[in-house]
Every structure is written in structure tokens, then in C-alpha cells.
């Protein structure tokens, strides 16, 4: 569950909110002056996010190296083509998962 709170309320209820995150695996979104400024998440989730970021960065670097010798317009066209080819399969996969779970 994700809970939103103000920075003032967060500061006043820090102990309770740490318990919500630690024991219930909740996440807390902290707003200040109506703007999102931070989030408090379970350490396991944060570790997963860091690993995903590292994998994304690695993939981005590999793609940049692979496309480095290709003119930008050609690279952009190839990426666009790959996205267009993959999109129907991704949508079909989502529909299949919804159908299997009974979601309408």
C-alpha cells in the first residue's frame, strides 16, 4: 500500500511510518507544499530498484555502443521499428494475463 503524507506529518510521525514501511512493506510518499519530494520504501524494494537501475544503465550503455557507428536517423528508425513490432505482442500478453486472472 502507498500512503501519502506531508513533510510536517512525516516528521511528527516518523516512528510510526518507519514501522509501516518495515513491518507492513508499505511505502510512504512525502509531499511538501503540494509537491512530491521523497518516498520511504522497504529496504528490500529499494535494493530491487537499485539492481533494476544497474541493469537498465548497463543495457543503455550496450545499446549506445551498438548504435555508435550508425547515423542517428537510421538508429532512431530501427528503434521505432522494433518498438512497433513488439507492441502488439506486449498488448496480447497483457490481455492474456488479465483473462487468466479474471480481470475484466
Image (cartoon, grey):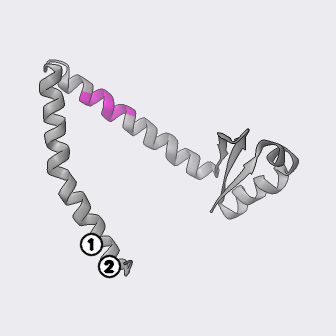
Q: Tell which residue pokes out farthest to the bottom in this image.
A: 102
Compared with 62, 102 (above or below) is: below
The foreground one among 4 and 42 is 4
| Disc on res. 23 | none
Q: Which residues are magenta?
A: 57-63
> Where the C terminus falls, by quadrant?
bottom left
Which residue corresponds to mark 1?
Answer: 96
Residue 74 magenta = no
- CA gap between label 2 and label 1 equals 6 Å
> Where the N terminus falls, by quadrant?
bottom right
Residue at 78% in and 42% down? 7
CB under 8 Å between discs 2 and 1: yes
Label 1: which secondary element: helix
Compared with 73, 87 (above or below) is: below
Compared with 61, 18 (above or below) is: below
Label 2: which secondary element: helix
Residue 59 magenta = yes
Q: Tell which residue pokes out farthest to the right in this image.
A: 12
Residue at 45% in and 38% down? 53
User: Is residue 7 found left or right of 25 in the rendered image?
Assistant: right
Residue at 38% in and 32% down? 57
Q: Which of the 4 quarters of the picture holds residue 56?
A: top left
Q: Position of residue 24 (x, y in %)?
A: 69, 64
Q: Position of residue 88 (x, y in %)?
A: 18, 58
The foreground one among 26 and 94 is 94
The foreground one among 27 and 44 is 27
Q: Position of residue 77 (x, y in %)?
A: 14, 32
Which residue corresponds to mark 2?
Answer: 100
User: Is residue 102 found left or right of 48 in the rendered image?
Assistant: left
Amino acid at each position: 500500500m502507498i500512503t501519502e503524507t506531508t513533510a510536517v506529518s512525516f516528521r511528527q510521525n516518523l516512528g510510526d511510518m518507519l514501522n509501516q514501511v518495515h513491518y507492513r512493506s508499505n511505502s510512504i510518499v512525502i509531499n511538501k507544499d503540494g509537491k512530491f519530494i521523497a518516498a520511504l520504501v522497504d529496504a528490500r524494494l529499494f535494493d530491487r530498484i537499485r539492481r533494476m537501475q544497474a541493469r537498465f544503465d548497463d543495457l543503455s550503455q550496450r545499446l549506445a555502443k551498438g548504435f555508435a557507428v550508425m547515423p542517428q536517423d537510421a538508429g532512431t528508425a530501427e528503434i521505432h521499428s522494433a518498438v512497433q513490432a513488439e507492441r502488439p505482442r506486449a498488448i496480447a500478453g497483457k490481455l492474456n494475463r488479465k483473462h487468466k486472472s479474471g480481470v475484466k
